[in-house]
Image (tube, helix red, strand yellow):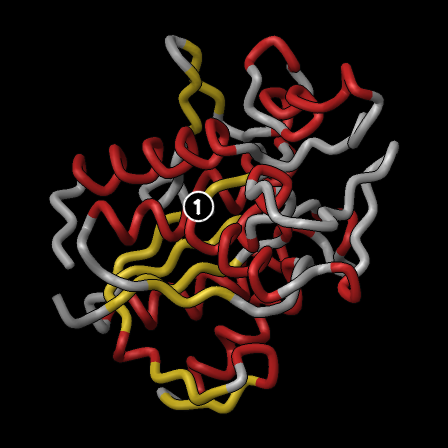
Amino acid sequence: MSKGIFGLGCSFTWGEGLYFYSNLDNLPFNEYHSYDFNKITNGMIEYKNKHRFIQLISNNFDTWCTVKNVNGTNNTRNIQVLKRLYNSDIIEETHYDFKLNINDYKLIVFQFTSIYRDEIEIDELLIELDKYLKHFEAKEIQVVTLTWMDEIFSSKTYQERYLDRHVNIKVGDTEKTSFEEFIHDDSLNITVRSDYKNKNLQINDTHLNHKGNQIFANSIIEKLQQDNFKI
């Protein structure tokens, strides 16, 4: 093992909500989901980092991973990071607090967040990103993508250029191309809300719990194994 996994996404990739399961003091529970950086301790950060799906994938391949230190973003900002790495193998990225060298990585996991956070058409965004991803793939860095909402998956450009990279999410015997429907089905018990709503806490919090993160990790690992991915 030498090279790692680079995860780009929104709060789902960051691991939002996992700290609620840590049993640490002063956990930031609310009736409705909110995020206040000032209430999050280093212990909470380290706990959620250990259990988020990117780390679980890394554990499976006996390697390490890098994810932005900042919770939440949009697709455009994540693409800008890859654009900088397209233009220069090594960049200094504020939200990582150190230099990034794309050649340190063997896998990029790109989790598309809601397209409604971007001020750009879906196909335009996907065409630009595809250019950068092809560049990294030519450097023998594998790329996998997963989508929150169906608008991206069902777009013409995604269907034409991304299906070889795409990961379906599997919950039991059910498989979906995007995970929006899963996170609103409390019977699956994969979200923070499904665990705490009966206590009138986090009653709209659809971020992933431990089970949800493991399901995402398993879905990605299965795709990588089918592709004979080696770290």
The residue at the point 28 percent across, 53 percent down is: 58
Q: Is residue 133 visible?
A: yes
The quadrant in which the C terminus is found is: bottom left
The residue at the point 43 percent across, 89 percent down is: 99
Query: Which amino acid, by three-letter code, is at mark 1?
Result: His
Q: Nearer the viewer, residue 147 or 161?
A: 147
Mark 1 neighbour class, 10 Å CA radius: few under 14, some 14 to 19, many 20 or more: some
Please state if 103 lies on the left or on the right of 10 as rendered.
left
Q: Nearer the viewer, residue 119 or 222?
A: 222
Residue 166 position (above or below residue 133): above
Q: Nearer the viewer, residue 76 or 231?
A: 231
The residue at the point 79 percent across, 20 percent down is: 199
Residue, disc 1: 51
Residue 147 position in % (x across, y down): 54, 40
The outermost residue toward the right is: 31
Residue 74 position (above or below residue 3): above
Residue 190 position (above or below residue 122): above
Within the image, what quadrant is residue 182 found in?
top right
Please state if 136 lies on the left or on the right of 188 as rendered.
left
The outermost residue toward the front is: 25
Residue 114 position in % (x across, y down): 70, 45
